[in-house]
Amino acid sequence: MGISFGSNNMALGIDIGTSAVKIVQLKKNPSGMPELVNYGYRPLPPEAMADGSVSDPAAVAEVIKELKKERGFKSASIYASISGQNVIMRFTKLPVMDPAELEQTVKIEAEQYVPYSIDEVSITHAVLKTVEEEEEGGGKYKILLVVAQKELVTSYTEVIKSAIGKCEVVDVDTIAAINALENSFMMTAESQEGGEVVAIIDSGARTTNISVLKSGILEFTRNIPIAGNNITESLKDTLKQEFDQAESIKIQEGSIGDGGGSEISEVIQGTVDELASEIRRSFDYFKAQSREPMIHKIILSGGSANLNGFSTYLMNELGVDVQVGNPLEGIAVNVPDADDLYNNLQQFTVAIGLALRGVTEA
């Protein structure tokens, strides 16, 4: 389901996040099945990224170079992403028309959402489905518009080019996560044809992305600026620790809903309560706008999904079945250190979704 701003048998997915770079290499094996043949993770220096933008290109490029040298990634088509919080994503309906005409109409339609010069942005779109508009006498395309500043896109592509090679496609991390988890939520007839409504909650370091799909079609998306770093900052302030120390405490001792009443649990509870409230508001808004009565299932992904008790807490708070997503569903794994990959799998969701584009698209 990827959307490009601009197929191969070998592809690299590069996810430059707030706190780390994640790279996944996939190839198409002889049977045509995607196969993960390499992966890597390396933290970024503090302040290398700021608000989803590259603030220190040299530092980010150096981390990618080190990761390439350490893991020995082979030459491949490169796919990267930018943060959904830094793009404009809007749903609209347009009359059915030929592709060339649609391309021009989309650009005109997008102008109403762009707060800066249209020459400064990249505009792309995806036709999600065709719907019948009986009151208007004909079918219409349901379109997802994606708009990003060219300067932002270029900052990513230039860093990647200087470190590892030319970037083929720049996607949005929200869409890449959906692409990675598609096999997880499209496995049953109910999900494909029965109108099942699935929410993907991808909670990373800086943001939590909420995407709601019906029968596998994206219907709603929102970015919430509450995620793993907010928990770490709260621990840092309460425990009077440095950020890195607070992060280690969160990973090693952090839990929610354990009934222990420890200071660490109480601090985490406060931030997660706030996040759950925002997710609930998002669901309520979606249901009101779409007239859908319920969310049937939540797929949880991202590094924050590893927080002990998080999925159970969300299930109890939101009254919706919660499953931790498996971005390797339908992908063969052929690496010597697979246990380490599986132990940290949620952090690689976006990178896997990016690399999938290169081995599954015609």
Image: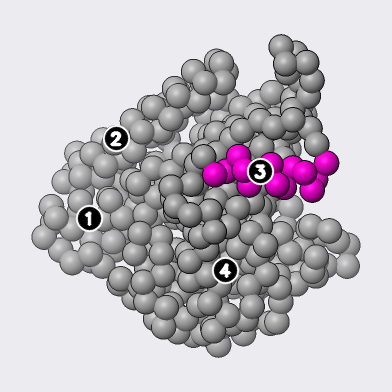
Identify the residue shown where x is 52% and y is 21%: 289
Say if mark 3 contacts mark 2, CB within 8 Å.
no
Q: Which residues are magenta?
A: 98-111
Numbered mark located on residue 106 in the image: 3
* Alpha carbon distance from label 1 to label 2: 15 Å
Q: Is residue 23 left or right of residue 54?
A: right
Residue 88: percent from left, percent from top: 50, 46
Q: Which of the marked residues, 1 or 2, is nearer the chain's N terminus? A: 1
- Element on which disc 3 rests: helix
Sequence-wise, the earlier of marks 3 and 2 is 3
Q: Which residue is mark 4?
A: 14
Secondary structure under badge 1? helix
In the figure, 158 relative to 328: above or below? Answer: below
- Crowding at mark 4 (Cα within 10 Å: few <14, some 14-19, many 20+): many
Q: Which SS does the magenta portion mostly show?
A: helix
State the residue position of label 2.
273
- Estimate the spatial distance between the alpha carbons at disc 1 and disc 3, rounded to whole Å: 41 Å
Foreground: 261 or 272? 272
Residue 140 at x, y percent in the picture: 74, 28
Give coordinates of residue 194: x percent, y percent: 73, 23
Q: 233 or 188, which lies in front?
A: 233
